[in-house]
Amino acid sequence: MRSRFLSIIAAGGLIVLGGATALAQDATPTASNLFADLGLPELTVTATAEGFALSETEVEAGRYLVTLNNETENPDLAAGFVRLVDGKTLDDLSSADELAAGTPMTEEGPPPEEFAWLFEAYIAGGVSATAPQAVIDLRGGDYGVWGDDPTSPVPATGLTVTGDAEAAIEGPAPEAAATILEEGEGGVGFSFVVEGELQAGPQIVEIVNNSDQPHFVIAFQYPEEITVEQAMEFVMFDPSSGATPGPDALDETLFTFPAYAPVQSAGTTQWNVIDLTPGQAVLVCFVPDPLAGGIPHAFEGMVSLVPVAG
Ligand SMILES: [Cu+2]
């Protein structure tokens, strides 16, 4: 099973858990720092052809303003913060070591069991080429900053966070234009619920994972008004099925992918600056649900068409 959307996205690389940003548009928001007034400690992730470099390698647990300095040509780059669990190392957060050893990569990628641990790990979210600033909560532990996909060829980089591993992080909460709630339960279904209204231009969105599995958020936009049925057809359509797209099918070449918020685990909140144009946005998540045969969350309801105020 493979939707047209998934095929388009996967054309830029393997997609297993995240990293589904292969068609993110080139424009990077150049908004001034919308988080400046919060006085949060800062972390900078610099991405180069060699991988990620962090401004600090050890920090205290807390709420951080993270900024991506993308020195690669990759418009789809993402950098997320995953806390390692016992027995897992940075090598488990990318395919860099396998690629270096000459292991051939298949389109399907490694078996899902290899990534099951990520569904139980603390994943704080992060930044991307299209959404290069975010506020995230780092609890104590050893983290890997990864390419938001366990099959990414980009090696993960370590970050030690000292302090309590379990305590919820306290700190000033950024004022968001809208809140995206991630709802639902594995094996039953997931959805996005948007509170407030998305705006045109750079804005802070709060993303709250109220469910029991990790999620990411891709926002895509179409230049004309569309219906939720058209959005669903576009996301679900499987070109390999031999089926003919319906008469109202959308033109895939007209889509833009203005924002990507990296994977975050259940119970977490991240605040991301995203930059939209007026009209509508479609929010989608393609994390696979292991309790539903590995189908993407989008196929379980995690597709939402929302207005973007002009
Ligand atoms: Cu999801």
Image: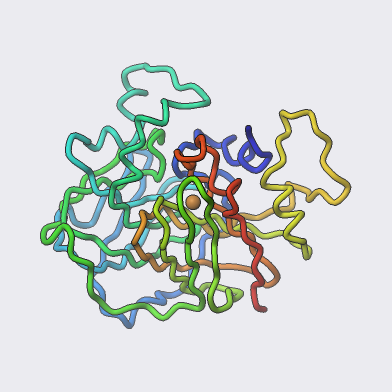
Q: Position of residue 56 (x, y in %)?
A: 19, 56
Residue at 18% across / 34% down in the picture? 87
Q: Residue furthest right?
A: 247
Q: Position of residue 284 (x, y in %)?
A: 57, 54
**In this orientation, does residue 25 appear?**
no
Establish if 199 lies above or below 82. below
Image quadrant holding the N terminus, namely top right
Q: Report whether 146 appears left or right of 160.
A: right
User: Which quadrant of the structure image shows residue 153?
Assistant: top left
**In this orientation, does residue 45 appear?**
yes
Q: Position of residue 158 (x, y in %)?
A: 21, 45
Q: Report whether 63 appears left or right of 287.
A: left
Q: Residue furthest left?
A: 163
Establish if 107 lies above or below 12. above
Q: Report whether 244 appears left or right of 76.
A: right
Establish if 164 lies above or below 52. below
Q: Position of residue 234 (x, y in %)?
A: 72, 47
User: Which quadrant of the structure image shows residue 224?
Assistant: bottom right
Nearest the viewer among 288 and 223 is 288
Tag count: 0
The image's colour scheme reads: rainbow
Image quadrant holding the C terminus, namely bottom right
Residue at 31% across / 39% down in the picture? 117
Residue at 33% across / 78% down in the picture? 173
